[in-house]
Amino acid sequence: MTRIRSILKQIRRVSILPLLCIAHFNGMAQVKPAKPQLNLDFEKVKNGRPIGWGITSNSQYAGQLDSGIVQHGKYSVSLTHLDGEGGFGNIGITIPYSYPGKKITLSGYLKTENVSDGFAGFWMRIDPKVAFDNMNKQQIKGTQDWTKYEITLDLDPTKTKAIVFGGILIGKGKMWIDNLNIQIDGKDIATLEPIAPARIPAEEDHEFDQGSNIGTFELDQNKQKALKDLGLIWGFLKYYHPQIAAGNYNWDYALFRVLPKILAAHNQQQRDQVLTAWIRSLGTYDTQTDTQEEHREIKLRPDLSWISSSGFSATLQLELQKVRKAKRNGSNYYIELASGIGNPVINNENPYAGMDMKDPGYRILSLYRYWNLIQYYFPYKEQIGKDWKTVLDEFIPKMVAADNTKAYTLTTLELIGNIHDTHANIWSKNKIIDEFRGERIAACYADFIQDKAVITGFHDKERGNIAGLKVGDILTSINGKPIESIVAEQLKYYPASNLPTQRRDIANNLLRSNDSTLQLTIQDGKKVYNRSVPTYPMDKMPLYSKYRNTDTCFKMLDRDIAYFNNGNAKRNYLSDLVEHVKNTKGLIIDCRNYPSEFIVHDVCSYLLPRATTFTKITVGDISTPGLFYTLVDQKTGNTNPDYYKGKVVILVNEITQSSAEFHAMAYSTHPNALVIGSTTAAADGNVSPFFLPGGIRTMFSGIGIYYPNGDDTQRVGVKLDVDVSPTIDGIKAGKDEVLEKAIALIRQP
């Protein structure tokens, strides 16, 4: 949930595909794999790069060969932080097969210079989800000369498909890597014969790599019903049928084979015959009677009522009910649950990044893929606010009509918005969305204060002053369009859990444009005037400066009131802070930010007198897709007679999201705590990312987070004891009215 944890999860999933690798998505398994030439000392070079290695190249980090600082030979590789926060740089290589043996060890040399706000290290991952380490626990920081380190992981040849390893720099500074070595059970990998990977039928099917072969068609009432029926059944089979779970079918391409027959069927009877024959052709499986779930607290049951309510023939219904009762072993080629956490890990979903989305087959696939993931693995489906099946019906004509990349992208964004989850959006860099929202931006930014769009600060104060704008100015229209109309038009393109969070995100983009100027109508008190404001390229503006708190994480507001900023806090600061805080009258914990580290349990060990339940967590089930049950209630704190006795006031607002909400919920269990502020982003729990056709990366909240009594947090947010929000007058005066209220509450007798 923390920023560092989020980065580490990205590393867990990052796909390094340098020259050595085969294409994972297409599954081109080699029958007799050749021994890899790993270039572990970086001495083999072509065009200024070490052969076989993938190296970071982005705006935050630079990776390159270094011939001046080496541990061995002529070259090392360096990784350097350039700019920004929250990212990582890495170098990596993939061996796309396994080896016989039980333990694999990566060793080598690291040199560091001024590493801070993160760590340096090696990383190694055994795919798929066999083992992983990134030396996070060793916390290599600061400046040090060449030092040898190693990572050892369990190696399971029966499960391993690939070995991925390299070096990583999280945070600031610079590191060098050199003279690596890989050993398996003490033997040099160069002396061992790799194991040919098992052939998986789903990975051997390439018939539709260049297109679905589905031509354009007119959507009438019969085809609309046909596509809805197929979408329901295709997704149900994907997650329920044992043969598909085993990877015996490329289920995307199975869709393209059956879809023409479904579209050609003239009526329900013909369609049911096609679907029945299709299901029977998939192969046999064992069945079981319905099992009782009395040993688990069920939060959400599968929605399979459509099997009997969709007008299917008795024969088709019987086949579907047989699949429902199939004996499943808890594994599925397309999905698994993260170890120790339980959020879905979505596997083997080809992003089809280069596919022309004019292809109607791939647009239908995109809708089916998304809709069924939500149908079976979104813990908050009951909080969506409407029957999810109506969304499938609604978006079939929209996807069929979205016959160009822009229309497809915006339709997908609108679809994502229907689950009302602030974690859900299009998170990949997307030129269509950038152009849609504007690739230029004004020097100032706005927030919604008292339901008005108000200038609250500047990305660039000098340029903002030139434009003649002031903090506290109210925007009433942009380019002649009232703000209310802009918001109403844009809401469907801003996925979020609630309206305050949608308006938060709309505000961030209000002053974007593709034009060089914006025509603004400004209200300042009773005065209304128009002003032409220049815009600037997005990459020339420090767009996230408004969220960066450069202040210390701790300060005394007076001798009896302490202030703790949860966004800047570090675990190793806490023991020193306790001494300053323990005798104060009140402690203000500011959660209007995102935590820099996951410190919830560390802080609560000081705050609470005893271990206290603060949340229920629900997770899904691979054996019964669509079922969600409650894990053991989550506790924080421990027995501590010297716990903090003063008042605790937790500050929240619409920026308080995910991990910040989780922290606030835990802190609020203090015996004398108050949560004050405004509605939070209402999206908690670990996220589950995946790709849709066209290379669109999205995600959703993968586990359910509830209060101990079962009350919702999704779409609702953290419970407030005192509702207080900024005012326009307060913004003009430079006040933090929420903080002022917290101080007043502590000073009350």
Image (cartoon, rainbow, N blue to C red):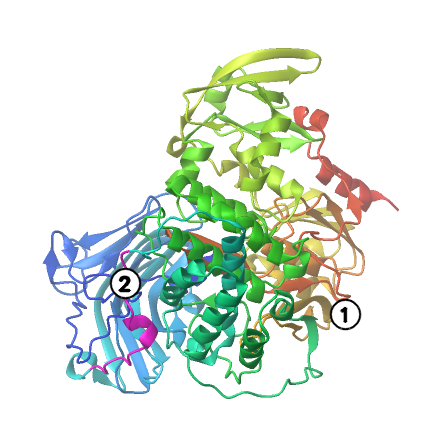
Q: Nearer the viewer, residue 374 or 452?
A: 374
Q: Secondary structure at mark 1?
A: loop
Q: Which residues are magenta?
A: 194-210
Q: Quadrant of residue 671?
A: bottom right
On the image, the x and y values in percent for residue 728 come to 70, 26
Give the residue displayed 54% in from the left and 41% down from the top. Answer: 493
Horizontal side, residue 311 vs residue 669: left or right: left
Q: Quadrant of residue 599?
A: bottom right
Q: Nearer the viewer, residue 565 or 528?
A: 528
- Residue extending farthest to the right is 749
Q: Secondary structure at mark 2?
A: strand
Q: Quadrant of residue 628?
A: bottom right
Horizontal side, residue 480 vs residue 384: left or right: left
Q: Is residue 713 above or below residue 295?
A: above
* Of the image marks 1 and 2, the number of the one nearer the N terminus: 2
Give the residue displayed 18% in from the left and 54% down from the top. Answer: 66
Indicate which disc residue 641 carries: 1
Q: Which residue is mark 2?
A: 92
* 367 magenta-colored: no
